[in-house]
Amino acid sequence: MNQFVYTRMLPALLSLLLLDACGAAPALAPSGSAAQRHLLSAPAGPSLASLVNVTTLAGPTNDDWGHIDAIGQAARFSGPACLALDAARTTLYAADMFCGSPRTIAVGPNAAPAVGTYPRSVMAPWGVAVAPDGSLIVSDCYQQVVWRFETSGAARIILGSPGVRGFRDGTSLRGPAPLCEWPQGVAVDANGIVYVADTDNLALRRIEPHGNVTTIAGGHGGGYADGPALTAKFANMGGLACDAAGKVYIADSRNHAVRVYDPLTKTVATAFAGAIDGVDADVQAVALDGAGHVYFTDGAGRRVARATLASHLAEVVAGTGAPTTIDGKGDQACFTFPVGIAVDGARHLVYVSDFDGQCIRRICL
């Protein structure tokens, strides 16, 4: 990795993170709202965190950063952000922000966790998703674009123009390029429709397979408002995830919430908002297990949590809140700043990128 790029971009990233953690007070929902009725709280019974195991799958346990392809803890990362699993659940993709390339980690049954570098580079990859046809969707937040890398080797920008900040719908195939500003999370539904968290515009963008880009939620300034999608408001937009019904789950960290866009009703609702064990949930990214749970990373809280969609109850899966890298039982394990998350529901595994710890963690449920 180019250290010059790292040192030039680090202040910008830290400013973004500090604004999220220490900026203006988050716009919480009014008293009695759906958001406050869904405050996160631990279900009764044994602690889930006491039953799971956390290990460091790839990267160091001492926060050492770099760009080294190797097996397991001999590999080095430089700011691993969002994660995505392929359809076979044998390859985990990590958007390695300061490395400038997505990374691959072998995660198949009995596979050694070999770390590689995807053969395409971007300036600052943050979001990553795998399309049904195997294409890799990657957001480059520093260059203000979203890329589509085909399995054939072809590559094209599907949203944005390199280095140009803006907010404009349109098509990536003709006419003025549709624009975005600091794109982060990306997700793809079963029909190949790409969704993008246009973070600085506080808007959810939709990209159809033929290239048409539309704003489908938000885009009218920061705040907290559910209801019709185009009048909904967000305070931040991070990682995204799609469920089998096509709903889009959105990490809204400054509202301490998971928001949900429904493409059938074209509305936004709050699935969860508030605190776990008295600590506001700094929701960075989300993932679904297909069994009625949404998992999310709590960056500033240095925890991973799971919420049950039917009951609106949530609990800590792993993390004590201490800023270090420690493996072990979930109630003893520690993270430095968890960001990305991916779930293999069939194998009862959760993968987490520890952005400040420069490693990929694995939680065995």
Image (tube, helix red, strand yellow):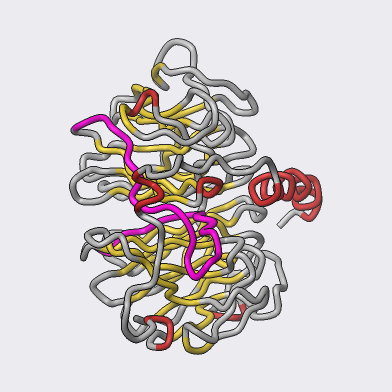
In the image, is residue 273 part of the stretch drawn in magenta? Answer: yes
Nearest to the observer: residue 202 or residue 137:
202
Q: Is residue 287 magenta?
A: yes
Residue at (64% x, 47% y) in the render: 20
Residue at 44% x, 73% y is 316
Q: Residue 27: image x %, image y %?
A: 55, 40
Q: Is residue 135 visible?
A: no
User: Would residue 67 be found to the left or right of residue 260 on screen?
Assistant: right
Residue drawn 53% across the image and 49% down it: 253
Q: Position of residue 238 (x, y in %)?
A: 50, 46
For the C terminus, which image quadrant?
bottom left
The magenta-colored residue range is: 265-289
What residue appears at the point 35 percent right and 50 percent down from the top-left corner?
241
Residue 342 on image: x %, y %: 39, 63
Residue 174, image quadrant: top left
Residue 98: x, y in percent?
A: 67, 53
Q: Is residue 224 above or below residue 257?
A: above
Placement of 198 over or under 106, stated as above or below: above
Vertical comparison of 304 with 206: above or below: below
**Up/down of 327 relative to 100, above or below:** below
Q: Quadrant of the N terminus?
A: bottom right
Q: Residue placed farthest to the front in the image?
A: 31
Q: Quadrant of residue 64?
A: bottom right
